[in-house]
Image: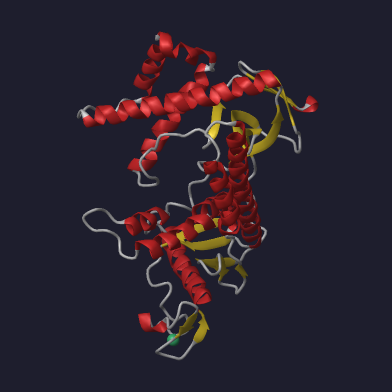
Amino acid sequence: MQRLQAFKYELMPNGRQQRQMRRFVGSCRFVFNRALALQKQRHEQGEKKLGYARLCKELTAWKRQAETAWLSDTPSQSLQQALKDLERAYVNFFEKRADFPRFKKKGQSDRFRYPQGIKLDQANSQIFLPKLGWLRYRNSRTVLGTVKNVTVSLSGGKWFVSIQTEREVEQPLPQSTTAVGIDMGIARFATLSDGSHFEPLNSFKRHETALRKAQQAMSRKTKFSNNWKKAKTRVQKIHSRVKNARRDYLHKATTTISQNHAMVCIEDLQVRNMSQSAAGNTDAPGKNVRAKSGLNKAILDQGWFEFRRQLDYKLAWNGGYLIAVPPQNTSRTCPACGHGSKDNRQTQAQFACMGCGFEENADLVGAINVLRAGHARFACEVSGAVRPPAAGTRRGESAPVG
Ligand SMILES: [Zn+2]
């Protein structure tokens, strides 16, 4: 099987390289935003959306205009990748995987990508990037496979390089043969049908106070003054700390689960729909907007999507499967007698069957039902009765980022 993997390292650029990279990041953001503005304008005028090839032609024209000639200082391929990102954002939107593309702001996903022209010298811990030259990096592990593309990013004041590779590996045999169902929750991040569970992450909550204070401090400073810049760096540092804590947590959880089980069943939750319906719209404002957006924030903070994405590719690496099941009735069906009623769920935490009196933690009951639904689904798949679920089977397509 093809294995895609990303290897990420901290870069040690010199002053010139840092200045250039800032410029590249800014130029890519400019191109993305300008192309998005163009598409929006065309849409308003009832014109068709431009395809990638046409956008590239626009880009060439922008480079020729005197006021945007500075775009030529940035590698063309990286600017084109920004247009590709916009294309991808539209596709994700049309396929209901994401919200409508938004304009990029400085300090948010500051990055640019090279699809080619990279040279990697691992023995000397350096990498050659077009228009930047050789850069040293903190070589913490060996890159395996053929380099497909390289992303340079700025986070918390540091520069990183993520090297995406591809290699052929033998289809692994699962180390384990057990199957497990997972119930995702707020009070407990994940409850497994074997009775174990993961505590909530709440990385954002924990840093929320610090973040609010830092933001307030920033707002008191004169904009663009040195003190303002210092305060801004502090805000960005807290943001990246939250991000790192969440990533570490999710990686640990998904590694543990994927190593211990061959088949993992999970509810097919549409997080995006949940966060949208909470806000409602002007005709029908969402009920309990505050409470619901609190819940949604908690869900997103928990990183359920990322959890599922990681589980998917890690299980594939280990020869296992992820199976997504529709979430209906998983919380109110009795695993002992099959009696299904909303009365079974007396409280958020406790399940008590009205039919047979079976009592158990409600999250555990959910996990057991998810496992059962997964088994049913898996049997159907093997007999070819239904198409594979969206998640578990798109091997090789998911691009893991470490
Ligand atoms: Zn029962």
Question: Quick check: can you spot residue 5?
Answer: no
The quarter of the image holding the N terminus is: top right
Q: Is 381 drawn above or below residue 356 in the view shown? A: above
Question: Residue at point 51% right, 25% down?
Answer: 26
- Residue 345 percent location from the top left of the image: 42, 81
Q: Quadrant of residue 249?
A: bottom right
How many labels were placed on the picture?
A: 0
Q: In the rendered view, does 159 fall on the left or right side of 108?
A: right
Task: Tell me the residue at 61%/49% (across/down).
Answer: 317
In the picture, the quarter occupied by the C terminus is top right
Q: Nearer the viewer, residue 309 or 131?
A: 131
Quarter assignment of residue 19:
top right
Q: Residue at x 63, y 34 (%)?
A: 162
Q: Give coordinates of residue 39: x percent, y percent.
A: 31, 28
In the displayed structure, 121 sits above or below 192; it is above
Occupied quadrant, residue 190:
bottom right
Q: Is residue 7 visible?
A: yes
> Which residue, as the protein is rendered here, is positioned at the far right?
123
Q: Position of residue 169 (x, y in %)?
A: 64, 41
Q: In percent of the image, x 40 and y 14: which residue is there?
A: 62
Structure colour scheme:
secondary structure
Q: Is residue 255 left or right of residue 282?
A: right
Q: Nearer the viewer, residue 89 or 383?
A: 89
Where residue 221 appears, x then y in whole percent? Answer: 55, 39
Q: Is residue 256 left or right of residue 75?
A: right
- Ligand 1 position by quadrant: bottom left
